[in-house]
Image (cartoon, grey):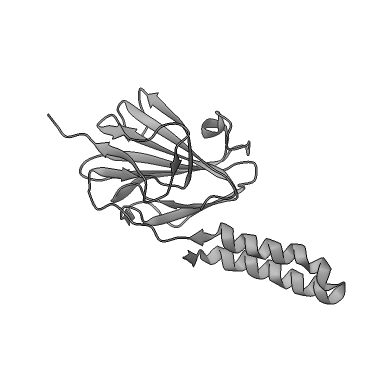
Amino acid sequence: MSIIQEGYYFAGAALFVALFVGILLSPYASIPFVVLACYCIYFFRNPERKIPIDESLIVSPADGTVQDVVQLTDDEFVKSPCTKIIIFLSVFDVHVNRSPIAGEIKVQKYICGRFRPAYKDSVGFENERHLIGIENEKLRVTVTQIAGILARRIVSWVTLDDKLEKGELYGLIRFGSCTEIVVPECVEVLVTKGEKVRGGETIIGKIRELE
C-alpha cells in the first residue's frame, strides 16, 4: 500500500508540531499531534486494486457506500436517459478517485458552492464540486467529486483531453465527501443502495449487449 504525496506533507507537519510541543511543553502534550499524523497516513492511503480487464465493465470511481441509485431523463454530457449512482465517502474510506472506464476527458468543470454534509440529498446541486466527462468508442460517463462539510478541498490531477485507463487515479477529496457517476441507459447497473464499493475494483455496471 502506498501513500498519496499530499499525505506526507500533512503527516510531516503534524509530526513537526508534535516535536515542537514535546520539547516546549511535555511529551504527553505531543500525543494528539502524533495521533493526527498517523491518521493523515491512514487517510491518504492508496491501496493496490485489481482492475477488471473486460471493456464492458464499469468500475466504481470511489470507495464508500452507495447512497442512492437514481434514474435521470437526461445528462448534460451523457445526453440520453441515464442512471446516477451516488457514493458517500466517510472519513474512514479511501479518498482517491479512479476512472470508471478507459477513455478521454471531453468535459471538465469546477463549480463553486456550499459545504453541506455530504450525505444530504441536495449536495450534488448545492455543494462545491468538480465534474469530468469521459468518453470512449462505446459510451460516455460523467463523474463528479463533491465537497462536504469537512471536505473543503477537491484535488484533480487531470485536464481536458487527458486519456485515462480504467481504474487510473485522477483525483482526491479531503476529508469526507461524495462521488457521483452518471452512466447511460445502455449500462446495466449492478449495485444497489446501501452496498459497499471499492474504487477501481467493484463492478458497478455492465454494457448491455446489443440484441
Left/right placement of residue 76 relative to residue 43 reads left
- Where does the C terminus fall, quadrant-wise? top left
Question: Residue 67: x percent and y percent?
Answer: 49, 33
Question: Residue farthest to the top?
Answer: 73
Question: Residue 24: x percent and y percent?
Answer: 86, 74
Residue in the foreground of this view, choosing between 113 and 195: 195
Is 92 situated above or below 6? above
Q: Residue at x 76, y 66 (%)?
A: 31
Q: Residue at x 28, y 29 (%)?
A: 185
Question: Residue farthest to the bottom?
Answer: 23
Residue in the foreground of this view, choosing between 47 and 167: 47
Q: Residue 148 lies in what quarter of the image?
A: top right
Q: Is residue 106 visible?
A: yes
Question: Residue 86: x percent and y percent?
Answer: 46, 35
Q: Residue 142 lies in what quarter of the image?
A: top left
Question: Residue 183: x percent and y percent?
Answer: 33, 35
- Count every numbered label the image shows and give the total: 0
Question: Residue farthest to the left?
Answer: 211
Q: Is residue 110 visible?
A: no
Q: Residue at x 41, y 49 (%)?
A: 199
